[in-house]
Amino acid sequence: MAKGRPRAFDMDDALDKALKLFWTKGYEGTSLSDLTQAMGINPPSLYAAFGNKEGLFRQALDRYMGEMAGGCSALNAPTARGVAEALLYGVANVDPEMPPGCLLVQAALSCSDSSETVRQELIDRRQGAEDALRERFERAQREGDLPPTASPVRLARFLTAISQGISVHAASGVGRQELMEIADMALKAWPAILDSSPTS
Amino acid sequence: MAKGRPRAFDMDDALDKALKLFWTKGYEGTSLSDLTQAMGINPPSLYAAFGNKEGLFRQALDRYMGEMAGGCSALNAPTARGVAEALLYGVANVDPEMPPGCLLVQAALSCSDSSETVRQELIDRRQGAEDALRERFERAQREGDLPPTASPVRLARFLTAISQGISVHAASGVGRQELMEIADMALKAWPAILDSSPTS
DNA sequence: CGGTTTATATAGTGGTTAGTAAAAAAATAA
DNA sequence: TTATTTTTTTACTAACCACTATATAAACCG
């Protein structure tokens, strides 16, 4: 065992509590007293373990991306269509134990100047997710799964936008079935959006 | 003229300044010093004229809805398809003089407990806009403009979700052309989503 | 045991938040 | 002019924000 007094709390458990708070109240909407109370620790313990509020948030972000990727990585679906289904249904099928919507959207769409770095980090992570989707569609196109007329970058952007719209609706209290119907409609449109020619 | 010392600032001008701030930084991200500085007035003048921060925000919301309705009321388009086009292109075609995205989405997706009433107000206004869209589609269906297979409530929800996704992208700095392409894809899917039968 | 190291709890720090008390200023009314 | 009404400016409040200095407690090593 490492020397020194052992930590009296589990970091992953505490991180989960922080994650849930940031997810529901947003980065700026979550105060340190909210955090310390939910995590069951005092401020000095939080700062010793996670650096500061922004550091804690970034680690909560990492945990979110990791656990989401483990649970429902849409990118591993065998077909492009399957990827789209898994993505949209994944967002629409909210876990009642978890806050609704996507953390990357909920945490900070707008914020004060002092949190600009956090807002930019979220923009980058959203773009990163969209890029991963685009690369998956590019692969599908190379493999003949998507027709040459399809535009991977536009498909990825469109699906990301839909998932964000579902996320906003989810955070507004819209029920799972209604969210699913949004996903259904987008998927019903799937064949039509595989042709990226100017108009149809 | 009314008796008493006349107000030294124009309320609509000041409201426009406040609106822009709330639009870019969000409700909680905008501080009173931000507001008084941008509006060019002192705190007591602000409180005398608008009540308090939440009152100011609500009046900024009213002004936003009013000016938006005047400039680009998508509901007045002659056809359901035209309504969808006007709505999506209206959100995608960001005014470089104005903050990107939709105020109803930007101002407060998540917030601290002390601003829950504001968050709920925004949820209600978003739902109100969706309801107005649904009613417009119901009318279109009665008039034969939309087929009996179409679901006005689902169409309205789907289009609202898309516009919110465009709004999130716009607030992330995505350019107008890319936003337009999202709208284009949704409109390309228009014929496909007019049939609300289970699967296709 | 003593010495070292790390985490803890207590109690605070300076700065910012939304909101205000009080008095002076600028208009009308008589 | 004087009285009245309303706005403006200045200075301020209490509460909360993220964060920390200090001392103590709990583990290890030798």
Image: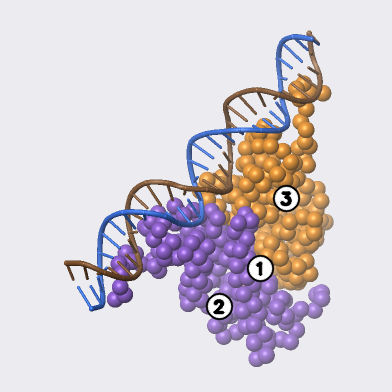
Chain colours: A purple, B orange, C brown, D blue
Residue extending furthest toward the bottom: A143
The quarter holding residue A137 reads: bottom right
The mark total stands at: 3
Q: Which residue is mark 2?
A: A74
State whether discs 1 and 2 lie on one chain.
yes
Have a look at marks 1 and 3 and say if they share a chain. no
Say whether residue A179 is visible: no
Residue A168 % position (x, y): 60, 60
Please indicate whether residue A68 sits to the left or right of residue B159 in the image. Answer: left
Residue type pointed to by label 3? Lys
In the figure, residue B97 lies in which quadrant?
bottom right
**Chain of the residue displaying label 2:** A
Sequence-wise, the earlier of marks 1 and 2 is 2
Q: For mark 3, give the secondary structure.
A: helix
Q: Residues within 10 Å of mark 3 (few under 14, many from 20)?
A: some
Mark-to-mark CA distance, 3 and 2: 38 Å
Residue tagged 3: B20
Question: What type is the residue that disc 2 sits on?
Answer: Ala
Q: Measuring from the top left, give residue A81's x and y in whole percent.
A: 62, 80
Q: Foreground residue, A168 or A123?
A: A123
Q: Chain of mark 3?
A: B
Which of discs 1 and 3 lies nearer the camera? The answer is 3
User: Quick check: A89 left or right of A130?
Assistant: left
- Looking at the image, is mark 3 or mark 2 nearer the viewer? 3
Q: Nearer the viewer, residue C1 or A126?
A: C1
The residue that mark 1 highlights is A161
| B71 shown above or below A48 | above
